[in-house]
Image (cartoon, rainbow, N blue to C red):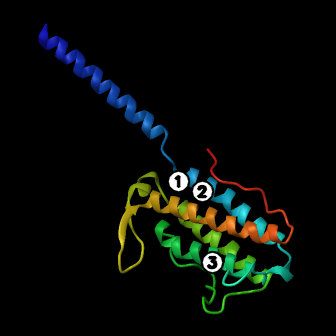
Amino acid sequence: MKHFNFLSKLSIVLILIVCTSQKLRAQAITPQDLIDSWDIMTKMVVQSAKIMPAEHFSFTPGDPVRSFANQLNHTTASNIGFGKSVNAGKPDFAMPDRANPPQSKDEVVDVLEKSFSYFRGGLEKLSQNDLAQKVQWGHPSNPKQITRLKAVLIVMSHLQREHGKSMMYLRAKGLKPAPAGSWKF
């Protein structure tokens, strides 16, 4: 009887472990969740960039704050720089010169859109297992190893924060930014 009781309890514990692990797996963030959310954030940032009139791309709320064009150039550079976290490869478009980035609305928006497509291309290649892989993160002199998922979440958090700054430029000019967007589940 003792042996049966032990097996019965062991079976219950194993069933609970299996059920719990399946429940946790069902709640995981998937590559498609990342793509869908990236698309929402892309639309938000690019639409906001297009709202600002061309003559205000040089606007800065004060020294030493970036101009609106350079705020967007920072987002572009970040999308490209963070592309290695999703194995996006080498961009298939001319990279902006960091010392002399584009300043006109057309050029800034063009390369911004390309940077979003570039990062999305990396997301499209990811599998669920890829999200658990470790990637190098941080400054080369002090690199850390984090999961690819964590890296993507940091990138998206950075994007939201930088877009919040861009929204302030638009509002300072009396313009309403594009609707905010984030995660889609």
Kindly state the secondary structure of the residue where label 2 is placed. helix
Q: Residues within 10 Å of mark 1 (few under 14, many from 20)?
A: some
Q: Nearer the viewer, mark 2 or mark 3?
A: 3
Residue holding disc 1? 31
Q: Which residue is mark 2?
A: 35
**Tags 1 and 3 in contact by the CB under 8 Å rule?**
no
Residue extending furthest toward the left: 2
Q: Residue at x 61, y 85 (%)?
A: 95
Kindly identify the amino acid type of the residue bearing the numbered disc 2.
Answer: Ile
| Residue at screen point 76% across, 72% down | 169
Quarter of the image where one finds residue 135: bottom left
Q: Is residue 75 left or right of residue 173?
A: left
Is there CB contact under 8 Å for labels 2 and 3?
no
Of badges 1 and 3, nearer the viewer stands 3
Q: Residue at x 64, y 48 (%)?
A: 184
Which residue is labeled 3 in the image? 74
Relative to residue 77, is residue 179 depicted above or below?
Answer: above
63, 86: nearer the viewer: 63
Q: Position of residue 138 (x, y in %)?
A: 42, 72
* Residue contact at pointers 2 and 1, CB within 8 angstroms: yes
Q: CA distance from mark 2 to mark 3?
A: 21 Å
Rendered position, 16 above or below 115: above
Q: Secondary structure at mark 1?
A: helix
Q: In the image as oriented, which residue stretches furthest toward the bottom?
A: 100
First in sequence: mark 1 vs mark 3: 1
Q: Tell me the number on the disc at residue 149.
A: none
Report the Cα–Cα distance between label 1 and label 3: 25 Å
Q: Amino acid at mark 1?
A: Pro
Three-letter code, disc 3: His
